[in-house]
Every structure is written in structure tokens, then in C-alpha cells.
Amino acid sequence: SMTLGAIVYLWLVTTLLGFVAFPLVFTAAGRLRDRGWAISKVIALVLVTYVSWLLSSLKVMPFGPASVGLGAGLVALASAFFAWRNRAELFAFLRGNRRLLFGLEGFFLAAFAVFLLIVALNPDINPDSERFMDYALLNGIDRTDYFPPTDPWLSGRTMNYYYYGYIMMAALHKLAVIPLPLFFNLALALVYALFTLTCFGMGLNLTGRAAYGWLAAFALMFIGNLDGFLQIVRGKFYAFDFFHGARVLVQEAADGKILDYPINEFPFFSLMWGDLHAYVIAYPVNLAILNLILNLSLAAARGARAVFFRAPSLSRA
């Protein structure tokens, strides 16, 4: 079917981006157990998007397949340079860690499949949910030539909302040309798969053990708070209110008047609700940054030396 073809297409493009950027990440993340494999797809997407965004913002080149393709080409060139320079170390790592790398790819594919099934339970993009706004923002950016993007609601104005995450998704859409409504749902599952993979990387790289990768992925992705567990313990299994989990801090006066209404949304809630919000797209980026900060924290040197001079590699630890 067209949907299955689109799923494979998007998975292939994302996986290839990760492969292309890996030698670059490998060089930068010399102290991580996986040498940045778990974050390479996200780093690739951020870098490719940045190039195309910059070209468009400076009015050098309109945002589209050509500028995104140029971004991918520049990342590939930089990566090829470092791959050649560190070829002995890179090939030794790839040979010595085949099981780990295949495991990470398998984990990513499985996560993507699981999240696609969840999204398939609620695929509608309709005005009753905030998805309608997410889709409008993505659609507006997808049609933009030069940034800042035009506002989809107010003609002649620029977008009054943080939008870089949507540019990332639109850039991916320029490489994986799929009808936008279908792409929107696939992108939602993909963002969560990337987030879960970068969580896995964090647990793995902190401890050197895959078991903690599983724990980190489960803890950050699936355990938002204990509200769902408490609902089941209290016998609400058949009247389960998943929305309640994201509104557990509401404070009421004795007469029932709401004093404060904080919203405590967490990754799994946002997935169930089906949001492709800016903060959702930021999940995997934040975890990729945390992995890189961990790499810095393992440095023997301080300051700029920690970035540019590597301690003995921990990749075999």
C-alpha cells in the first residue's frame, strides 16, 4: 500500500541521514560508548536543516529540495573528511561493535513501528484538536520560500510562534516526498522513535550497559507520572482517563473554584493526544544535546581543550 511504502521511505531517508552524519558525530563524541550512533540521525537532521534555513533566511536560495539537498551534501562532505582522517579508528569501531549498532537500529525500527500503531489509533487532523494548528504551521513552512515563514492564519504577517522544529520536519519532507497529511502522522511517530533512541543512548553512554539504555528509554518515554498506575489501582481500569494524567496539579478551593491550572504534559501523553508541537520535536534534540554534554563531562581537559582534544577513547569500555 501507499502507506507502507511511505513508512519505509521515511525510515530509509532518516536512517541514511544518520549513516551519513555518523563519522562527524563519531569524531565529536569520542568518549561515548556508542560514539554517538544513537544521536547521529537527530544531529544530521539539525545540521541539514540549519544549512537550508540559513540559505533561505539570507535570501541566497529558497527553502526547498535543492537547499535541503545542498545541506545534506555539505554534511556528507564534512563527514567524509573526518571518516577519511579517522578511518582506522572508525573501521575498528564498526567491526568491534556490530552487535551494538545493529541492536540500536533494531530498537529504532521497533520503536517506530510501535508508535505508528499508536498514531494509527487516532490519525485524524481535525479542528477539534491542536493537531490542526500543528498541521497549519507545518503546511505554512512547507510552502515558504524565504524565512521567516508566513503566518497561516493572518495573511501578510510572519509566524508568531517558535517554528524551528517545524522547519526540521519540513526539511525532512523535502527529502522524503510524501503527501503532507500522511507525512504529518508518520513524522509524529518518527519524532518519538528518535526520542526513545536518544534516551536509550543516554542510558547506554552513562553506564556502558544496554540494560540501562532500556531503563532510560522506558523511564523518559513511558513513565510520565504515577497517575495512570494509581487510576488502575483505584479500580478505574474501565473508566480510564488518560487526559487526567496531564492535569494532576490542578488546585481547587474548598468551594470547587479552580485556583491554579498547571499543565503537566509528558512524552507519552503527548503521543496519545497526537501532538506534533514544537516542544515534542525538541525532545530528541534535547536528548542529543544531553548525550554530547555527557561526552564533554567525561573529558580529562577543561574549557576549549575538552572540545578539541580527546581523552583516550572509552568506546571499548
Image (cartoon, grey):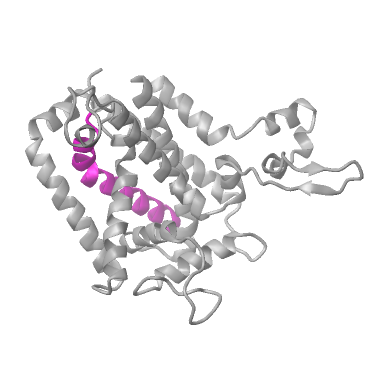
Residue 65 in view, yes or no: yes
- Horizontal side of 44 relative to 228 (left or right) equals left
Was residue 266 drawn as part of the magenta stretch in this picture? no
275 and 99: which is toward the camera: 275
> Would residue 197 appear left or right of 71 to someone viewing this image?
right
Q: Please name the residue shown 26% across and 67% down the image.
A: 55
Percent from the top left, x then y, of residue 145? Answer: 34, 75
Percent position of residue 165, x then y: 43, 56
Q: Quadrant of the N terminus?
A: bottom left
Q: Position of residue 182 (x, y in %)?
A: 47, 60
Q: In the figure, residue 266 lies in which quadrant?
A: top right
Q: Is residue 87 above or below residue 247?
A: above
Q: Residue at x 88, y 45 (%)?
A: 256
Q: Kindly give the residue lying farthest to the bottom in the view shown.
A: 156
Asked if residue 6 is among those painted magenta in the image, a careful observer would answer yes
Residue at the (53%, 55%) spot, across then down = 277
Dominant SS of magenta comes to: helix
* Image quadrant in which the C terminus is located: top left
Q: Position of residue 142 (x, y in %)?
A: 40, 68
Region rendered in magenta: 2-30
